[in-house]
Image (spheres, rainbow, N blue to C red):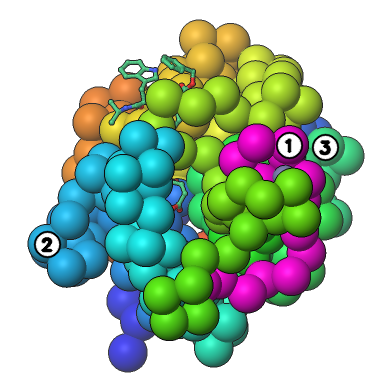
Amino acid sequence: MPQNIQFTRTLLDHLRSVEKVAVLTGAGISAESGVPTFRGENGLWKKYRPEELANFDAFMSNPSLVWEWYNYRRDLISGIQPNPGHYALAELEPMYRSFTLITQNVDGLHRLAGSKHILELHGNIMINRCISCGTVASDVQGPQDTDLPHCECGELLRPDVVWFGESLPERELRLAFDAAESCDVFFSIGTSGIVQPAASFPLVAKQNGAYVVEINVEETVLSSHMDETVFAPSGEVMPQLVRRLNEVRD
Ligand code: BJW
Ligand code: ZN
C-alpha cells in the first residue's frame, strides 16, 4: 500500500503558477520497473563496480566482458515497462510552457511512457556505434556467443552510451544546462548525484533561483542543497504529486 505523501504548500503553489520546469532523472526512477540501479546494495553486476566496466579502456581490454554486461541489461530492459513515476512525468509535461526532462538513463523508458522533450545525456543502450568510424548501427544485436559485433569497416561496435572519461553529446549537454539555468522548479529524481556533469544541474538551477526538489528513497550528496526533499519511491511520489496538482486549489 503506497504511503500518503505530504507536499509543502510552497511546492504546490510554485507548481501551480510557474511556467518552466526541468527534471533530472537517474537509475532510481526505473528501479520500480525492475532495472537495477548502479550503486548501492543491488547495484553490482558480478561484483564489478560500474566504474570498472563503463569505460573505453575496460572495453578494449575485455570487450566480451563489457558486451556481456550490456547484453544482460538489454535483455532485461527489453522485457520491462515504465512505472507510475515515468507516466506521471509524461503527464506533468503538457502542464507547462517549458518542460525539459534530462535523463541519465539509457533504458528508453521515459519515451515509452509518453514523455516528449527528453534529453538522453548518457545515450541509449539499444543502439550500437563503431569505435572507429562512428557509424551508428540500428541493429541491436550484441555478440552471439563469443562473436563480437563488428562494423562494416572492420572495427568493433560498442553500445552508443557515454562512458567515464567521455564527452556527453554536445546538443543534449547545452540544452540541459540551458534548462537548469532558466527553470523555475527543478526536480532531481532517483539519482545518487555522484556522476558529473549531471550532478551539477540541480546546483546550477538553485544558483539561478529555481526551487529545487529531490525525490529519492534515501539521502544523497545533493540533499543538503535542496529546498525540499521527499524520501519515498518516485513511483509513489510522482503520481500523488500530479494528482494534487490536478485537484481544485484548496
Ligand atoms: C530511488 C529509488 C526509487 C533507488 N525512487 N529513488 C568533476 C569532478 C569529479 C569527477 C568528474 C568531474 N567531471 C567529470 C568527472 C569524471 C566522471 C565522474 O563524474 N566521475 C565520478 C564517479 C566522480 N564523469 C565523466 O567521466 C563524464 N564525462 C565527462 O564529464 O566528460 C568531460 C570530461 C572528460 C574527461 C575528463 C574530465 C571531463 C561521463 C559520465 C558517464 C557516466 N556513464 C554511466 C554509464 C552510462 C552507460 C550505461 O548505462 O552503461 O552513466 S555510469 C552510471 O552512473 C550511468 C548513470 O547514468 C550514472 C549515474 O548514476 P545514477 O543514475 O545516479 O544511479 P545510482 O545507482 O548512482 O543512484 C540511484 C539512486 O536512485 C540512488 O540514490 C537510490 O537511493 C535511488 N533510488 N530506488 C527514487 N524507487
Ligand atoms: Zn566503422
Residue at (50% x, 10% y) in the render? 207
Q: Position of residue 76 (x, y in %)?
A: 45, 81
Relative height, residue 225 to residue 82 (above, below): above
Q: In the rendered image, is residue 54 in sight? A: no
Residue at label 1?
133
Q: Quadrant of residue 131?
A: top right
Give me the C-alpha separation between circle 2 and circle 1: 33 Å
Query: Which callout, 2 or 1, points at the residue further toward the start of the chain?
Result: 2
Give me the C-alpha separation between circle 3 and circle 2: 42 Å
Q: Position of residue 41 (x, y in %)?
A: 12, 63
Direction from residue 189 to residue 225 in the image, left or right: left
Is ligand 1 less than 8 Å from the beta carbon at label 3?
no
Q: Amino acid at mark 3?
A: Ser
Q: Is residue 136 magenta?
A: yes
Task: Label 2, secondary structure: give it.
Answer: loop
Q: Which mark is residue 47?
A: 2
